[in-house]
Image (cartoon, rainbow, N blue to C red):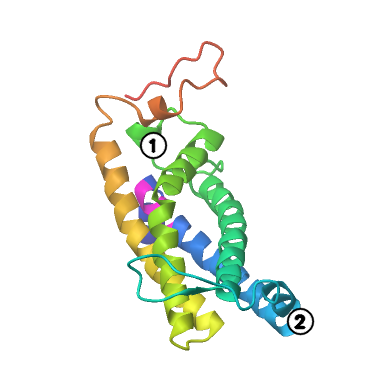
Amino acid sequence: MGRLSDWYDYRIVNVNVNVVAAGIAALGVTVGALHLMDRSGALETVTSLVRGHEFSIPGLPFRFIGEKLVIGGLTFAIDLVADVLVYYALHWAANHMPRRRQVPPTRAYADLTFMRDATLVQFERALLSPVMYIAALGLQQRLLHVGWGLEASTAIGFGVGITITRVLHTMWMLRAERAAGVSSAADIVGPDRSRPDGAKADRG
């Protein structure tokens, strides 16, 4: 456990772990919320507004059915809110919570306060989110069309989306760390206004 804790202290490791944990937690919230809406009849009420409408995109081998698009939209909204809230809490605990033993901040991110650090991760994730949601919701819609259940389609779709974006994000963070001797990742979000003179921390 001690060795695992040491590995978790490194930002590139805990960012990936925390993103996956937040994604799984958000997925649980999303599937649970959709399940409750389905059982209570609320989902039927909402989807009935667009029942019978179909949309097609040239080149795609299937049509988008109105009620399934509503499910996709609800999935996106619930997952996004839950994921962001859980990730901020985990990132603070892993990288900024005062504790007795912690590795020095990674040079590429040593200048960042908690809000700027966690927001930078969310900024990077936002740029990758089209890949995430196209894979997740696209697979969800496809599985729904071939007869899979709502819960299974959502879980499988988001599992694939999370895996793809974790690989891409890890490559991005590795590149930032390799370039840390030249410039700081803090340059992306500007000088730290919490410091009296806007000066950056000594990166050693």
Left or right of 11? Residue 80 is right
Residue 31 has which mark?
none
One can see residue 74 in this view: yes
- Does residue 94 appear left or right of residue 16 in this picture? right
Residue 166 rendering spot, x and y as whole percentages: 35, 57
Which residue position is annotated with label 2?
Answer: 40
**Which secondary structure lies at badge 1?**
loop
Does residue 121 lie above or below 55 as drawn? above
Q: Earlier in the sequence, mark 1 or mark 2?
A: 2
The image shows residue 49, relative to residue 120, as above or below, that is: below
Task: Please state which amino acid type lies under the numbered disc 1.
Answer: Pro
Q: Which residue is mark 1?
A: 104
* Furthest residue toward bottom: 147
Residues packed near mark 1 inside 10 Å, few (<14), some (14 to 19) or many (20 plus): few
**Mark in the foreground, 1 or 2:** 2
Residue placed most toward the observer, 9 or 40: 40
In the displayed structure image, the side of residue 190 where residue 193 appears, left or right:
right
Q: Amino acid at mark 2?
A: Ser
Image quadrant in which you'd find residue 20? bottom left
Q: Residue at x 39, y 50 (%)?
A: 128
Q: Is residue 198 left or right of residue 47?
A: left
Q: Which residues are magenta?
A: 12-17
Q: Secondary structure at mark 2?
A: helix
Name the image quarter holding the C terminus: top left
Residue 68 placed where, x, y %? Answer: 56, 74
- Look at the magenta stretch and give its main secondary structure: helix
